[in-house]
Image: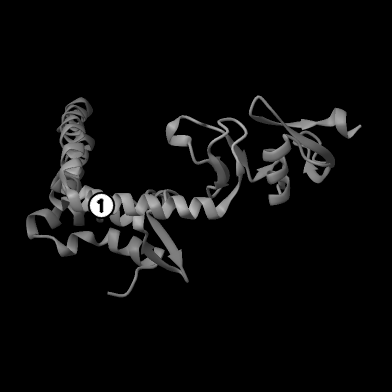
Amino acid sequence: PKPFTEGTLITAMKTAGKTLDADEAAVLKDVEGIGTEATRANVLETLKRRHYLVTKKNELHVSGTGVTLCQAVALEPLLTSPSMTAKWELALKEIGEKKRTPENFLGQIKLLIQKLLKEVPEQFAQNADLQTQLVAQQQVEQKQQAQAAVGVCPICKTGEISDRGKFYGCSNYQKGCQFSLPKQWSGKKLPISAIKQLIKTGETAQLKGFKSKKTGKTFSAKLKLEAGKLKFDFDKYK
């Protein structure tokens, strides 16, 4: 099929009930499909931010990570069940009509989450094909991170700092290293040369174009890392 754009996928989410059986479709049609006008776009933004979806020439494509996620989720039918979505929407509708309490609904959700947390990892570990794909995907990601790396993490000394979208972060974040650097600081987009210099030496040369939040005026200053935190260094500038 032709790849979705963000617009056509949001429309598909809105009209999802048309592809279901009559009983399931009735509820989703009443609530206009999956999500709401306020949440559908946010769902797509989250998927893109976590690199499950990628945009190419205005078309949405599932990344390798996204494929792995889909196959892992498919191990537990409840996670992808339109019927379950319809039941949840019906429950929310009943809460709005005072026919059900929020506590009752949340209690059922907690039981479901506990069930999934127990079963899904076991199913995942027992699926040889999925384990093979996961290893291959991790190798691809590690290669991509190495190619995009801008330096060795100054905090853990072993991770690579690379572009994470809205910031630069350490490849050891899953192991506990929380070091990151912003792409923009005080109204100024930080050049990659400054990021590399910060990582390597702990400070930058004088940079122009910072903007004061109090006065709105622009100023120049150096940046430095202090205990892993980014700060202005006016003393050295003087």
Q: Residue at x 7, y 55 (%)?
A: 23
Q: Residue at x 37, y 64 (%)?
A: 61
Which secondary structure lies at badge 1? Answer: helix
Q: Residue at x 73, y 36 (%)?
A: 201
Mark 1 residue type: Thr
Residue at the far right in the pictured view: 238
Viewer-nearest residue: 214 or 181: 181
Which of the image's four quarters has the C terminus? top right
The reply to whether residue 98 is in sight is no
Above or below 206: residue 82: below
Viewer-nearest residue: 30 or 219: 219
Q: Is residue 86 left or right of residue 227?
A: left
Viewer-nearest residue: 168 or 104: 168
Above or below 184: residue 6: below
How many circles with numbers are drawn on the protein? 1
Residue 62 % position (x, y): 35, 61
Residue 18 % position (x, y): 18, 64
Please rate how many residues cluster around mark 1, counting C-alpha atoms within 10 Å: few if below 14, some from 14 to 19, many from 20.
few
Q: Which residue is mark 1?
A: 132
Which of the image's four quarters has the N terminus? bottom left
Q: Is residue 82 left or right of residue 42?
A: left
The reply to whether residue 182 is in sight is yes
